[in-house]
Amino acid sequence: MRVLGLITEYNPFHNGHLYHLQKSIRVTGATHSVAVMSGNFLQRGEPAMLHKWARAEMAVASGVDLVVELPTVYACSSAEIFSFGSISLLDKMGVVDAVCFGSEEGNLKYMNKIASVLVKSPSFYNAKIKEYLEIGLPFVVSRSKALLDYFKEENSFNDSEIKHVKQLLQSPNNILSIEYLKAIIKLNSRMIPYTVLRKKSDYHSKTITSDICSATAIREHLHNKQKLHDLRNVMPSKSFAILEENSKNQIGPIFSQDFENIILSVFRRESADSLKQFFDINEGLNNRTFKCASSTSNLYDFYDCVKSKRYTLTRIQRIAMHVLLNIKESDITSTKNENPQYLRILAFNSKGREILRACKKTSYLPIITKLANYIPQNEIAKNMLSIDLRATNIYRMSIPNKSVKESNLEFTKSPIYVG
């Protein structure tokens, strides 16, 4: 058995994901696959369009063998924390041989070099990033500039390569890939990293022009209330059928605007000082978010009011989710360098069962198939789980279907077996 690890959100599972899965299996020679998937709230600070069990079922119905949940404290956080939690979860399973991620680069040569510098954090690089941060540049921009300065200082690359690295650092999927590589180095993991070139559609693309489009385009299509049938050609048939069924039963799709009143109410309930207790709300940003929440009446206007050259839209969206879910600075700092504390099973097939059977002998983490039977082994695990439960309880408030909205999904939903 050779097990492939994937890091995913599947929001929703579309043809691009299917291409990545099939290509990753070929590249790695894997016989089995496991996907770590974000739960009901995602890395860009948005709710998932369908709840985690539906999205996990989409994945297994389309060829993934096992889907496990990335705890919310990692899933709705920065690229660094998201990546560390995901890689750590795969690593602690003890059975994953390779991890493969999509990138615009399609080659690990330069990304490995960048990841190595970020882990070693040399003094010249540290001084440069501090310099750029002090003049008010966002962290991502400051880091990219500091890296380029370091490579020039060390004569690591020629001018043409420096130009290539600069372009590489402007892509969100390349940046995530570098974070995955960093985590592998930090954990001294035995997993072998691979990357495959993303096919056709750009990560941020909002248009559907072929049989492969971005998840963003699919969500935009649904948010604009365009015909569901139009998505039939951009999703695997079983994945589309699950989306169609959930839409028909009014279980989804869910969007950030469905939480608009709750988010603005919570911001208005807090004081400017109390907002500082939430993760990533630095000095000054607390006043800005409080003022904007008090003077705007919808989420789009709130985000537009807060964002700036220094404070990106994605960062503001994540902050909004942290406030919504009551995720404090202390919740993140206490877990950001800790491994996930449990392995939560969402969906599997017969080969997924084989992975779980092997995991019972090798996993460093307790495996949760029935939540009622799980007892957290320490305070970190207890807090991590409480955030997951809170996230689902808040998420279901946005589901139109009354019976689903009122059911305690975390205890009524079991891992889904796809035969």
Image (cartoon, rainbow, N blue to C red):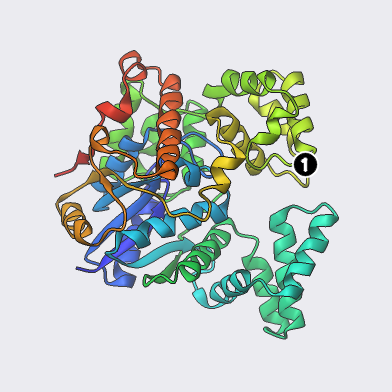
Q: Nearer the viewer, residue 214 or 175?
A: 175
Residue at the image point whose x is 73% and y is 76% from the top: 150
Left or right of 324 on screen, residue 377: left
Q: Nearer the viewer, residue 352 or 104?
A: 352
Where is residue 149? Give x, y as percent.
Answer: 76, 74
Left or right of 279 on screen, residue 235: left
**Is residue 311 depicted above or below 148 in this figure?**
above
Residue at the image point whose x is 75% and y is 80% from the top: 152
Residue at the image point whose x is 74% and y is 38% from the top: 307
Q: Nearer the viewer, residue 209 or 404?
A: 404
**Can residue 208 be seen here?**
no
Q: Residue furthest top?
A: 402
**Is residue 252 depicted above or below 129 in this figure?**
above
| Residue wearing tag 1 | 308
Residue at the image point whose x is 57% and y is 20% from the top: 262
Q: Secondary structure at mark 1?
A: loop
Q: Amino acid at mark 1?
A: Ser
Q: Residue furthest front?
A: 378
Q: Quadrant of residue 370?
A: top left
**Is residue 6 depicted above or below 375 in this figure?**
below
**Can residue 26 be seen here?**
yes
Where is residue 321? Give x, y as percent.
Answer: 57, 33
Q: Quadrant of residue 61?
A: top left
Q: Quadrant of the N terminus?
A: bottom left
Where is residue 55? Give x, y as percent.
Answer: 34, 39
